[in-house]
Amino acid sequence: MKILWVFSSFGVGGAQRRFAALAGALGPDMQHVVSAMDDRYEAEALVPPSAWVRLRPIRARKGRLISRANLAEFSRILAEERPDVLVTTNWGAVEWAFAAREAAGHLHCEDGFGPDERADRQALRRVWGRRLAFRRVDAVLVPSRELERVAREVWLVKPHKLRFTPNGVETAHFARAGADRSPAANRPLVVGSVGALRPEKRFDRLLRVFSALAAERDDLRLLLVGDGPERAALEALAAKLGIARLVEFAGAQSEVAPFYARMDAFALTSDTEQAPLALIEAMASGLPAAATEVGDVSAMLSPGNRPYVASADDETGLARRLAALMGDAELRERLGGANAARVAAEYDVSAMAGRWRRIFEEIAPGRRRKRA
């Protein structure tokens, strides 16, 4: 089966890391052609050698929801590639729904919102754009129950088109890396986070929370893995708070498991998330988490870890919860073990790949005709 994937960007991020894991888990009978609306392809480095993946640059300009030049380009690519399934991801690629696509089933994925949108504060233009586009696709995939509700109640996606499909990771890979974590008694304790340094991730909040903790004890360090437009501002804030020497900006990494192995607790401080891949990876690595109450975060964590989730606007509460984790080694070990067990049972990549494969087989036009 041949799949054409269209991303708003193929820079390193959650959706791109999910694709890399899927491409490896789906096996060699799947051919994946990848296009990016912004012509960025850094995430190619994440793809395992065993996966059949080819990059296909496109000429597209963003602006209006529907551009005649773009639609002509999209139709040309679909005619040349002749995929069994077209997969588009997030608002930046929704325009493909209006291109001629008779030969391909169309699956559209929505992973969440950027800094200019939230589940409870969406741009009206995008709401109507999604409503129009989703009438034309075969299925809409969402990884969280919160997005499932939004898709049903706001975007008016018909129930037969809606697919709730949780994200997954290679749990054994992260568990092995986490097993190499050195004893905390021999080193400073590390609070860590992984993600693109974008405004909605609110790493400024994490720096302030960490600063409050570091003022009370001198054995803490902060590890931030990822890169993005906010890096310079965050480095300046760390210096202003007087914690620059305690903070490591590790930059973007194609292999993140060793960095989770360096952490003692994971922190998620975003204003908006749905089913964050970084949280799943951290849990698989055996880490407890302090997090903001966004998307499905509480439901994803093990029951014992859920009291360590705070409102996004409660920095004091978040600092208090993180301090409790950092002050109790036995608690960290117990919650981390429970998180790892929950991920292995609910969020393994093999289960995710099986769900995606079934959707592909269901909507591919040739298979639909054969069943009919």
Image: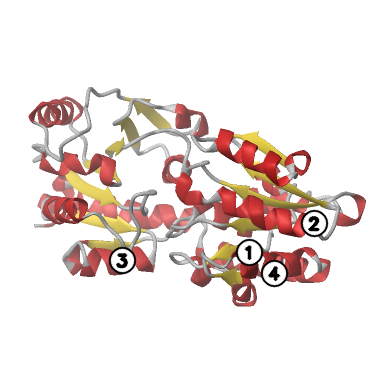
Q: Earlier in the sequence, mark 4 or mark 3?
A: 3
Q: Nearer the viewer, residue 234 or 189?
A: 234
Foreground label between 1 and 2? 2
Residue for badge 3: 148
- CB of mark 4 within 8 Å of CB of mark 2? no
Q: Residue at x 24, y 49 (%)?
A: 107
When asked about the image quadrant of residue 315, the answer is bottom right
Which secondary structure, mark 1?
strand
Discs 4, 1 touching: Cβ within 8 Å:
no
Q: CA distance from mark 3 to mark 2?
A: 41 Å
> Which badge, 4 or 2, is on the more N-terminal residue?
2
Q: Is residue 288 above or below residue 19?
A: below
The amino acid at mark 2 is Ala
Q: In this rendering, does residue 226 appear at all?
A: no
Q: Which amino acid is tagged 3? A: Glu
Q: Residue furthest right?
A: 186
Disc 1 residue type?
Ala
Mark before the other along the chain sequence, 4 or 1:
1
Q: Is residue 170 left or right of residue 33?
A: right
Residue 179: percent from left, percent from top: 76, 53
Q: Which residue is mark 1?
A: 290
Quarter where residue 371 is shown: bottom left
Front: mark 4 or 3? 4
Q: CA distance from mark 4 to mark 2?
A: 13 Å
Q: Earlier in the sequence, mark 1 or mark 3?
A: 3
Q: Nearer the viewer, residue 175 or 263?
A: 263
User: Under tag 2, what secondary structure?
Assistant: loop
Check disc 4 and report the residue beneath it.
Answer: 320
State which tag comes first along the sequence, 1 or 2. 2
Q: Nearer the viewer, mark 4 or mark 1?
A: 4
Residue 215 disc label: 2
